[in-house]
Image (tube, rainbow, N blue to C red):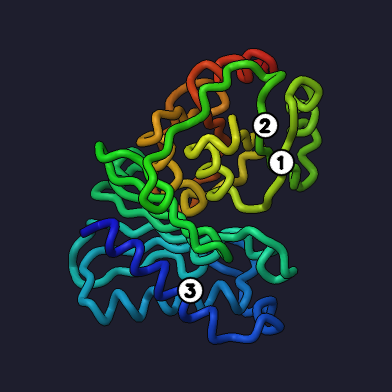
Amino acid sequence: MSLKLLEEICKIEIDAISKIPEKEYSKFIKIGAGGDKTKFIDLVAEEATISYLEKIGYEGRIISEEIGEKRFGNKDYPIIILDPIDGTTNAIRGMIPYSISVAISNGPMLSDVYAGVVLEIPSNRIFKAEKNKGAYLNDRRIYVSNTTSLKNAIIGVDMKVRGKRYCIRELLPLIFLVKQIRILGSASLELCYVASGSLDLYIDNRGLLRITDIAAPYIIIKEAGGKILKIDGSELDCPISLKERISLIAGNSEICKEVLLKIRRNF
């Protein structure tokens, strides 16, 4: 039932944004609860989800990048964690890919997430996972890459450091060592590409990711046999809150260890 609900949310959003002209995508609406500018495409997608949850009588809460937190009924749980559009800049510039990322949790921590779905736009491929039931791309079971050597690795990074030059310096050893780098503009999708083995590793050391970016791919990577860690090498976990700002590394356990050694952080 959980996956069906999350997949339906994705379908509802796709239907909603398909009805607005692309030239309207970039219209500035407000500063969202997550701190970024809410564009019209974000608002339309999020409002479609809110309306759908009200229609079906959902009871629990939603945490979303634009609205913040909203309660339906009197229950605290489950919590739906939604990024209505991840990769808004790609969407409004006419570039691909971008995505819808939605997860559901039965507790207050990221580790309480028990199902997640990421819909890739415009391909409409669905990455999904439910706790202890494996990870899938559409109906095909997926697993993280078994690449362990950086010289053979294709990795994803984010270079929008917002003045934090040390983040670039920290990644320089990887840039010189790896086979290839991809910067795609949608963290949730890049993490799903790790889950499916398309990317061997993803690293974001900026301390800027939000819970809405990572909640769905978090469970997808774990169910695909991968690791998703803090930059100090410990298991990633945090409260489900828009106040959280997160750095992480994801891949198989061996390549994560190698990367953490190479970047030589002082903890």
- Relative image position of residue 255 (x, y in whole percent): 57, 19
- Quickly name the residue at label 1: 182
- Relative image position of residue 81 (x, y in whole percent): 39, 57
Q: Do we see residue 267 in this rendering?
A: no
Q: Earlier in the sequence, mark 2 or mark 1?
A: 2
Residue drawn where x is 67% and y is 19% of the image: 150
Quadrant in which residue 266 is drawn: top right
| Local crowd size for mark 1, using a 10 Å CA cut-off: few (<14), some (14–19), many (≥20) | few
Q: Depth check: 65 or 200 in front? A: 200
Q: Amino acid at mark 3?
A: Ile
Q: Earlier in the sequence, mark 3 or mark 1?
A: 3
- Quickly name the residue at label 3: 14
Residue 48 is tagged as none
Q: Amino acid at mark 1?
A: Arg
Disc 3 from disc 2: Cα separation: 30 Å
| Local crowd size for mark 2, using a 10 Å CA cut-off: few (<14), some (14–19), many (≥20) | some
Q: Earlier in the sequence, mark 3 or mark 2?
A: 3
- Relative image position of residue 231 (x, y in whole percent): 57, 26
Q: Is residue 11 left or right of residue 244?
A: left
Q: Are marks 3 and 1 in contact (CB under 8 Å)?
A: no
- Quickly name the residue at label 2: 154
Residue drawn where x is 66% and y is 33% of the image: 155
Q: Depth check: 252 or 88 in front? A: 252
Q: Do we see residue 28 in this rendering?
A: yes
Position of residue 84 relative to residue 166, above or below, is below
Q: Amino acid at mark 2?
A: Ile
Q: Are marks 2 and 1 in contact (CB under 8 Å)?
A: yes
